[in-house]
Amino acid sequence: MRAGTLTRAGGWHGPGGWHGPGGWHGPGGWHGPGRWHGPEAGTGRRLARGFAGVVKVAPFAGACGGANATAPCPGLAVPRGRGLAVPRGRGLAVPRGRGLAVPRGRGLAVPRGRGLAVPRAGSTAATTKAREEGVGAIIIDALRRSGGSPPDEAPAAAIRYRDSLVVVLTLTTGAMDAVTFLHLGKVFSSVVTGDLALLGVAAGQHQGALAVNGGLALAGYGCGILIGAAFAGTSSQGQPVWPARVTITLAVELALLAAFSGGWLAAAGRPAGASRLALLATGAAAMGVQSTAVRRLGQMSTTYLTSTLTGLLTALAIRRWPSEWQRSTGILIAIVVGATLGALAATWSPPLVPAAILVPLAAVVVLSLPAVRSSR
Protein backbone atom coordinates (compact mmCIF):
# COMPACT_ATOMS: atom_id res chain seq x y z
CA MET A 1 0.00 0.00 0.00
CA ARG A 2 1.48 3.36 -1.05
CA ALA A 3 2.22 6.06 1.47
CA GLY A 4 -0.59 8.58 1.87
CA THR A 5 -3.32 6.19 0.92
CA LEU A 6 -4.54 5.96 4.49
CA THR A 7 -4.98 9.71 4.83
CA ARG A 8 -6.57 10.51 1.49
CA ALA A 9 -10.27 11.41 1.18
CA GLY A 10 -12.23 8.23 1.69
CA GLY A 11 -9.17 6.47 3.11
CA TRP A 12 -8.70 4.84 6.50
CA HIS A 13 -8.03 8.12 8.35
CA GLY A 14 -9.25 10.56 5.70
CA PRO A 15 -12.57 12.47 5.60
CA GLY A 16 -15.41 9.97 5.55
CA GLY A 17 -13.07 7.11 6.36
CA TRP A 18 -13.06 4.69 9.29
CA HIS A 19 -11.37 7.11 11.71
CA GLY A 20 -11.88 10.33 9.76
CA PRO A 21 -14.47 13.07 10.31
CA GLY A 22 -17.95 11.56 9.96
CA GLY A 23 -16.55 8.04 10.00
CA TRP A 24 -17.20 5.17 12.37
CA HIS A 25 -14.76 6.34 15.08
CA GLY A 26 -14.26 9.93 13.91
CA PRO A 27 -15.91 13.14 15.16
CA GLY A 28 -19.65 12.80 14.73
CA GLY A 29 -19.38 9.10 13.98
CA TRP A 30 -20.95 6.12 15.72
CA HIS A 31 -18.20 5.87 18.37
CA GLY A 32 -16.94 9.44 18.06
CA PRO A 33 -17.35 12.37 20.50
CA GLY A 34 -21.00 13.20 21.16
CA ARG A 35 -22.29 10.02 19.54
CA TRP A 36 -23.63 6.65 20.72
CA HIS A 37 -20.53 5.26 22.48
CA GLY A 38 -18.39 8.41 22.53
CA PRO A 39 -17.34 10.56 25.52
CA GLU A 40 -20.74 12.30 25.61
CA ALA A 41 -22.76 9.10 25.32
CA GLY A 42 -24.68 10.04 28.45
CA THR A 43 -26.53 12.68 26.48
CA GLY A 44 -27.38 10.36 23.63
CA ARG A 45 -30.46 8.28 23.20
CA ARG A 46 -31.25 4.60 23.35
CA LEU A 47 -33.32 3.31 20.48
CA ALA A 48 -35.43 0.20 20.85
CA ARG A 49 -37.77 -1.20 18.28
CA GLY A 50 -41.32 -1.76 19.63
CA PHE A 51 -44.58 -3.09 18.22
CA ALA A 52 -44.92 -3.12 14.42
CA GLY A 53 -41.36 -1.84 14.05
CA VAL A 54 -42.13 1.58 15.52
CA VAL A 55 -38.99 3.06 17.03
CA LYS A 56 -39.41 4.20 20.62
CA VAL A 57 -36.95 6.69 22.10
CA ALA A 58 -36.05 6.71 25.78
CA PRO A 59 -33.56 9.36 27.04
CA PHE A 60 -30.55 8.06 29.00
CA ALA A 61 -29.92 9.28 32.52
CA GLY A 62 -28.07 12.53 32.15
CA ALA A 63 -29.81 13.54 28.92
CA CYS A 64 -32.04 15.92 30.82
CA GLY A 65 -30.69 18.51 33.21
CA GLY A 66 -27.04 17.52 32.74
CA ALA A 67 -24.14 19.78 31.95
CA ASN A 68 -24.59 19.31 28.20
CA ALA A 69 -28.40 19.33 28.18
CA THR A 70 -30.01 21.91 25.92
CA ALA A 71 -33.68 21.26 26.80
CA PRO A 72 -35.67 19.82 29.68
CA CYS A 73 -36.57 16.17 29.44
CA PRO A 74 -40.10 15.68 28.09
CA GLY A 75 -40.04 11.92 28.33
CA LEU A 76 -40.01 9.25 30.98
CA ALA A 77 -38.33 10.20 34.27
CA VAL A 78 -35.53 7.76 35.14
CA PRO A 79 -33.38 8.02 38.31
CA ARG A 80 -30.03 9.71 37.60
CA GLY A 81 -27.31 7.20 36.92
CA ARG A 82 -29.71 4.40 36.08
CA GLY A 83 -31.23 3.54 32.76
CA LEU A 84 -34.55 1.94 31.99
CA ALA A 85 -33.89 -1.75 31.34
CA VAL A 86 -35.53 -2.81 28.10
CA PRO A 87 -34.81 -6.24 26.57
CA ARG A 88 -32.69 -6.21 23.42
CA GLY A 89 -34.79 -5.84 20.31
CA ARG A 90 -37.89 -4.74 22.18
CA GLY A 91 -39.43 -1.38 22.90
CA LEU A 92 -41.57 0.14 25.60
CA ALA A 93 -45.13 0.23 24.24
CA VAL A 94 -46.97 3.34 25.40
CA PRO A 95 -50.36 4.36 23.89
CA ARG A 96 -50.06 7.05 21.25
CA GLY A 97 -50.30 10.52 22.73
CA ARG A 98 -50.20 9.27 26.31
CA GLY A 99 -47.34 8.79 28.73
CA LEU A 100 -46.75 6.94 31.95
CA ALA A 101 -47.92 9.04 34.92
CA VAL A 102 -44.99 9.16 37.35
CA PRO A 103 -44.80 11.56 40.34
CA ARG A 104 -42.79 14.71 39.57
CA GLY A 105 -39.14 14.31 40.42
CA ARG A 106 -39.46 10.57 40.89
CA GLY A 107 -38.31 7.88 38.54
CA LEU A 108 -40.03 4.72 37.39
CA ALA A 109 -38.76 1.99 39.72
CA VAL A 110 -38.12 -1.19 37.77
CA PRO A 111 -36.88 -4.26 39.71
CA ARG A 112 -33.14 -4.81 39.24
CA GLY A 113 -32.36 -7.15 36.46
CA ARG A 114 -35.87 -7.06 35.02
CA GLY A 115 -36.93 -5.28 31.90
CA LEU A 116 -40.34 -4.38 30.61
CA ALA A 117 -41.21 -7.44 28.58
CA VAL A 118 -42.90 -6.39 25.36
CA PRO A 119 -43.96 -8.99 22.78
CA ARG A 120 -41.90 -9.34 19.61
CA ALA A 121 -43.56 -8.43 16.35
CA GLY A 122 -45.22 -11.38 14.70
CA SER A 123 -45.97 -13.30 17.89
CA THR A 124 -49.21 -15.22 18.14
CA ALA A 125 -52.31 -13.56 19.58
CA ALA A 126 -52.28 -15.72 22.70
CA THR A 127 -48.61 -15.01 23.38
CA THR A 128 -49.11 -11.32 22.73
CA LYS A 129 -52.01 -11.15 25.20
CA ALA A 130 -50.05 -13.00 27.88
CA ARG A 131 -47.05 -10.72 27.45
CA GLU A 132 -49.21 -7.59 27.48
CA GLU A 133 -50.65 -8.72 30.80
CA GLY A 134 -47.11 -9.16 32.05
CA VAL A 135 -46.28 -5.62 30.94
CA GLY A 136 -49.28 -4.27 32.81
CA ALA A 137 -48.31 -6.07 36.01
CA ILE A 138 -44.73 -4.79 35.83
CA ILE A 139 -45.80 -1.21 35.11
CA ILE A 140 -48.32 -1.21 37.97
CA ASP A 141 -45.67 -2.65 40.30
CA ALA A 142 -43.20 -0.01 39.12
CA LEU A 143 -45.71 2.79 39.73
CA ARG A 144 -46.37 1.52 43.24
CA ARG A 145 -42.62 1.39 43.99
CA SER A 146 -42.28 4.95 42.69
CA GLY A 147 -45.17 6.29 44.80
CA GLY A 148 -47.62 6.60 41.94
CA SER A 149 -51.12 5.17 41.64
CA PRO A 150 -52.19 2.79 38.89
CA PRO A 151 -55.14 4.14 36.86
CA ASP A 152 -58.69 3.15 37.76
CA GLU A 153 -57.55 1.14 40.75
CA ALA A 154 -58.89 1.56 44.28
CA PRO A 155 -58.59 -0.59 47.40
CA ALA A 156 -61.41 -3.11 47.68
CA ALA A 157 -62.07 -2.08 51.29
CA ALA A 158 -62.56 1.55 50.24
CA ILE A 159 -65.02 0.53 47.52
CA ARG A 160 -67.01 -1.60 49.96
CA TYR A 161 -67.10 1.29 52.43
CA ARG A 162 -68.35 3.67 49.74
CA ASP A 163 -71.03 1.22 48.62
CA SER A 164 -72.22 0.78 52.20
CA LEU A 165 -72.65 4.54 52.58
CA VAL A 166 -74.61 4.69 49.32
CA VAL A 167 -76.96 1.96 50.56
CA VAL A 168 -77.55 3.79 53.85
CA LEU A 169 -78.22 7.01 51.94
CA THR A 170 -81.01 5.27 50.02
CA LEU A 171 -82.96 4.89 53.28
CA THR A 172 -83.51 8.65 53.23
CA THR A 173 -84.75 8.45 49.64
CA GLY A 174 -87.36 5.82 50.50
CA ALA A 175 -88.59 7.72 53.56
CA MET A 176 -88.91 10.99 51.63
CA ASP A 177 -90.86 9.38 48.79
CA ALA A 178 -93.27 7.76 51.22
CA VAL A 179 -93.90 10.98 53.17
CA THR A 180 -94.30 13.04 49.99
CA PHE A 181 -96.73 10.60 48.42
CA LEU A 182 -98.86 10.12 51.51
CA HIS A 183 -99.08 13.71 52.81
CA LEU A 184 -97.82 16.15 50.19
CA GLY A 185 -100.02 15.57 47.17
CA LYS A 186 -99.75 11.96 45.93
CA VAL A 187 -96.52 12.63 44.02
CA PHE A 188 -92.88 11.63 44.53
CA SER A 189 -89.90 13.68 45.59
CA SER A 190 -87.26 11.56 43.81
CA VAL A 191 -89.02 9.32 41.28
CA VAL A 192 -89.32 12.03 38.65
CA THR A 193 -90.34 9.58 35.89
CA GLY A 194 -93.37 8.75 38.03
CA ASP A 195 -94.13 12.46 38.39
CA LEU A 196 -93.95 12.85 34.59
CA ALA A 197 -96.47 10.02 34.24
CA LEU A 198 -98.69 11.67 36.84
CA LEU A 199 -98.64 14.88 34.84
CA GLY A 200 -100.03 12.91 31.93
CA VAL A 201 -102.69 11.38 34.17
CA ALA A 202 -103.63 14.84 35.45
CA ALA A 203 -103.96 16.12 31.90
CA GLY A 204 -106.05 13.15 30.83
CA GLN A 205 -108.41 13.34 33.82
CA HIS A 206 -108.42 17.12 34.14
CA GLN A 207 -107.03 17.03 37.69
CA GLY A 208 -105.59 20.48 38.26
CA ALA A 209 -104.35 19.79 41.79
CA LEU A 210 -102.38 16.73 40.67
CA ALA A 211 -100.87 18.70 37.81
CA VAL A 212 -99.74 21.44 40.22
CA ASN A 213 -98.24 18.92 42.61
CA GLY A 214 -96.44 16.99 39.88
CA GLY A 215 -95.14 20.14 38.23
CA LEU A 216 -93.92 21.55 41.56
CA ALA A 217 -92.13 18.31 42.41
CA LEU A 218 -90.39 18.34 39.03
CA ALA A 219 -89.44 22.00 39.40
CA GLY A 220 -88.08 21.45 42.89
CA TYR A 221 -86.06 18.43 41.75
CA GLY A 222 -84.64 20.41 38.84
CA CYS A 223 -83.60 23.26 41.12
CA GLY A 224 -81.94 20.72 43.41
CA ILE A 225 -79.96 19.37 40.45
CA LEU A 226 -78.70 22.86 39.61
CA ILE A 227 -77.73 23.54 43.23
CA GLY A 228 -76.10 20.16 43.74
CA ALA A 229 -74.13 20.28 40.49
CA ALA A 230 -72.54 23.54 41.58
CA PHE A 231 -71.21 21.85 44.73
CA ALA A 232 -70.53 18.32 43.47
CA GLY A 233 -68.84 19.13 40.17
CA THR A 234 -68.21 16.36 37.67
CA SER A 235 -66.42 13.06 38.06
CA SER A 236 -62.90 12.77 36.67
CA GLN A 237 -60.42 10.03 35.99
CA GLY A 238 -58.25 9.21 38.96
CA GLN A 239 -60.53 10.90 41.53
CA PRO A 240 -60.70 9.48 45.09
CA VAL A 241 -63.22 6.76 45.87
CA TRP A 242 -65.18 9.31 47.91
CA PRO A 243 -64.37 12.89 46.82
CA ALA A 244 -64.68 15.64 49.40
CA ARG A 245 -67.21 17.44 47.20
CA VAL A 246 -69.65 14.57 47.67
CA THR A 247 -69.70 15.09 51.43
CA ILE A 248 -70.08 18.85 50.97
CA THR A 249 -73.03 18.32 48.63
CA LEU A 250 -74.68 15.90 51.05
CA ALA A 251 -74.24 18.50 53.79
CA VAL A 252 -76.23 20.91 51.60
CA GLU A 253 -78.95 18.26 51.29
CA LEU A 254 -78.88 17.80 55.05
CA ALA A 255 -79.53 21.53 55.48
CA LEU A 256 -82.50 21.39 53.09
CA LEU A 257 -84.00 18.38 54.87
CA ALA A 258 -83.46 20.06 58.24
CA ALA A 259 -85.54 22.96 56.93
CA PHE A 260 -88.11 20.44 55.66
CA SER A 261 -88.24 18.80 59.10
CA GLY A 262 -88.73 22.16 60.80
CA GLY A 263 -91.67 22.94 58.52
CA TRP A 264 -93.12 19.48 59.06
CA LEU A 265 -92.99 19.81 62.84
CA ALA A 266 -94.41 23.33 62.67
CA ALA A 267 -97.42 21.94 60.80
CA ALA A 268 -97.76 19.12 63.34
CA GLY A 269 -97.32 16.56 60.58
CA ARG A 270 -100.44 17.73 58.73
CA PRO A 271 -99.28 20.47 56.33
CA ALA A 272 -101.87 22.14 54.10
CA GLY A 273 -102.08 24.99 51.63
CA ALA A 274 -98.90 26.99 51.05
CA SER A 275 -96.94 25.09 53.71
CA ARG A 276 -97.63 21.81 51.95
CA LEU A 277 -96.46 23.19 48.61
CA ALA A 278 -93.33 24.65 50.23
CA LEU A 279 -92.50 21.33 51.85
CA LEU A 280 -93.06 19.49 48.57
CA ALA A 281 -90.67 21.78 46.70
CA THR A 282 -88.05 21.62 49.46
CA GLY A 283 -88.15 17.82 49.70
CA ALA A 284 -87.88 17.42 45.92
CA ALA A 285 -84.96 19.87 45.82
CA ALA A 286 -83.16 17.85 48.50
CA MET A 287 -83.53 14.70 46.41
CA GLY A 288 -82.13 16.52 43.39
CA VAL A 289 -79.08 17.55 45.41
CA GLN A 290 -78.61 13.95 46.55
CA SER A 291 -78.78 12.70 42.96
CA THR A 292 -75.91 14.97 41.87
CA ALA A 293 -73.82 13.96 44.89
CA VAL A 294 -74.15 10.24 44.18
CA ARG A 295 -73.63 10.76 40.47
CA ARG A 296 -70.19 12.22 41.28
CA LEU A 297 -69.24 8.79 42.66
CA GLY A 298 -69.73 7.08 39.30
CA GLN A 299 -72.40 5.08 37.52
CA MET A 300 -74.74 4.60 40.47
CA SER A 301 -77.86 6.19 41.90
CA THR A 302 -79.97 6.32 45.05
CA THR A 303 -83.02 7.98 43.45
CA TYR A 304 -83.76 6.74 39.92
CA LEU A 305 -83.46 2.96 40.29
CA THR A 306 -85.16 1.50 37.21
CA SER A 307 -81.81 0.90 35.51
CA THR A 308 -80.46 -0.66 38.71
CA LEU A 309 -83.29 -3.20 38.76
CA THR A 310 -82.90 -3.82 35.03
CA GLY A 311 -79.20 -4.54 35.42
CA LEU A 312 -79.76 -7.03 38.23
CA LEU A 313 -82.50 -8.92 36.41
CA THR A 314 -80.42 -9.02 33.23
CA ALA A 315 -77.48 -10.43 35.17
CA LEU A 316 -79.77 -13.05 36.66
CA ALA A 317 -81.04 -14.03 33.22
CA ILE A 318 -77.59 -14.42 31.63
CA ARG A 319 -75.95 -15.68 34.84
CA ARG A 320 -73.14 -13.18 34.70
CA TRP A 321 -73.04 -11.11 37.88
CA PRO A 322 -71.44 -7.66 37.67
CA SER A 323 -68.99 -6.55 40.33
CA GLU A 324 -71.49 -4.05 41.76
CA TRP A 325 -74.40 -6.48 42.19
CA GLN A 326 -74.17 -6.40 45.99
CA ARG A 327 -74.44 -2.61 46.07
CA SER A 328 -77.34 -2.66 43.62
CA THR A 329 -79.19 -5.27 45.65
CA GLY A 330 -78.60 -3.32 48.84
CA ILE A 331 -79.93 -0.12 47.27
CA LEU A 332 -83.15 -1.79 46.12
CA ILE A 333 -83.72 -3.30 49.56
CA ALA A 334 -82.88 -0.01 51.30
CA ILE A 335 -85.43 2.05 49.37
CA VAL A 336 -88.18 -0.40 50.37
CA VAL A 337 -87.07 -0.36 54.02
CA GLY A 338 -86.82 3.44 54.03
CA ALA A 339 -90.26 3.82 52.50
CA THR A 340 -91.69 1.46 55.11
CA LEU A 341 -90.15 3.46 57.96
CA GLY A 342 -91.30 6.75 56.46
CA ALA A 343 -94.85 5.51 55.95
CA LEU A 344 -95.07 4.13 59.49
CA ALA A 345 -93.77 7.37 60.97
CA ALA A 346 -96.01 9.60 58.85
CA THR A 347 -99.09 7.52 59.62
CA TRP A 348 -98.70 6.61 63.26
CA SER A 349 -96.22 9.10 64.71
CA PRO A 350 -95.66 12.22 62.56
CA PRO A 351 -93.04 13.71 64.93
CA LEU A 352 -90.77 10.79 64.03
CA VAL A 353 -90.68 11.67 60.32
CA PRO A 354 -87.63 13.96 60.74
CA ALA A 355 -85.74 11.06 62.34
CA ALA A 356 -86.63 8.72 59.48
CA ILE A 357 -85.26 11.10 56.85
CA LEU A 358 -82.41 12.82 58.72
CA VAL A 359 -80.70 10.04 60.63
CA PRO A 360 -79.49 7.98 57.62
CA LEU A 361 -78.26 11.10 55.78
CA ALA A 362 -76.51 12.54 58.84
CA ALA A 363 -74.83 9.18 59.46
CA VAL A 364 -73.49 9.13 55.89
CA VAL A 365 -72.12 12.67 56.18
CA VAL A 366 -70.34 11.87 59.44
CA LEU A 367 -69.05 8.45 58.36
CA SER A 368 -67.72 9.84 55.08
CA LEU A 369 -65.37 12.25 56.81
CA PRO A 370 -62.60 9.63 57.36
CA ALA A 371 -62.77 8.76 53.66
CA VAL A 372 -62.40 12.44 52.78
CA ARG A 373 -59.39 12.86 55.07
CA SER A 374 -57.67 9.75 53.71
CA SER A 375 -58.08 10.96 50.12
CA ARG A 376 -56.16 14.18 50.73
Image: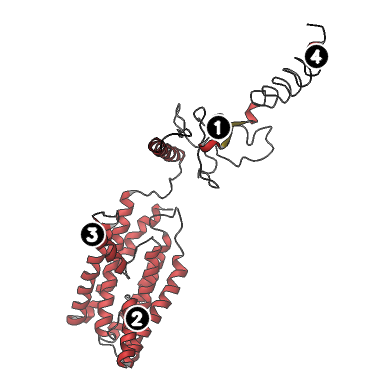
Quick check: can you spot residue 273?
yes
Q: Amino acid at mark 3?
A: Ala
Give coordinates of residue 268: x percent, y percent: 25, 86
**Quarter of the image with the N terminus in it:** top right
Give coordinates of residue 165: x percent, y percent: 30, 61
Circles 3 and 4, Cβ within 8 Å, touching? The answer is no
Task: Give the residue displayed 36% in from the left and 75% down from the top.
Answer: 286
Residue 224, quarter of the rendered image: bottom left
Is tag 3's residue or tag 2's residue first in the polypeptide sequence?
Answer: 2
- Say what secondary structure mark 3 lies in: helix
Distance of label 2 from label 4 (alpha carbons): 94 Å
Disc 4: which residue: 7
Image position of 258 with respect to 107: above or below = below
Q: Which mark is residue 48?
A: 1
Nearer to us: label 1 or label 3: 3
Q: Nearer the viewer, residue 146 or 128?
A: 128
Disc 2: which residue: 196
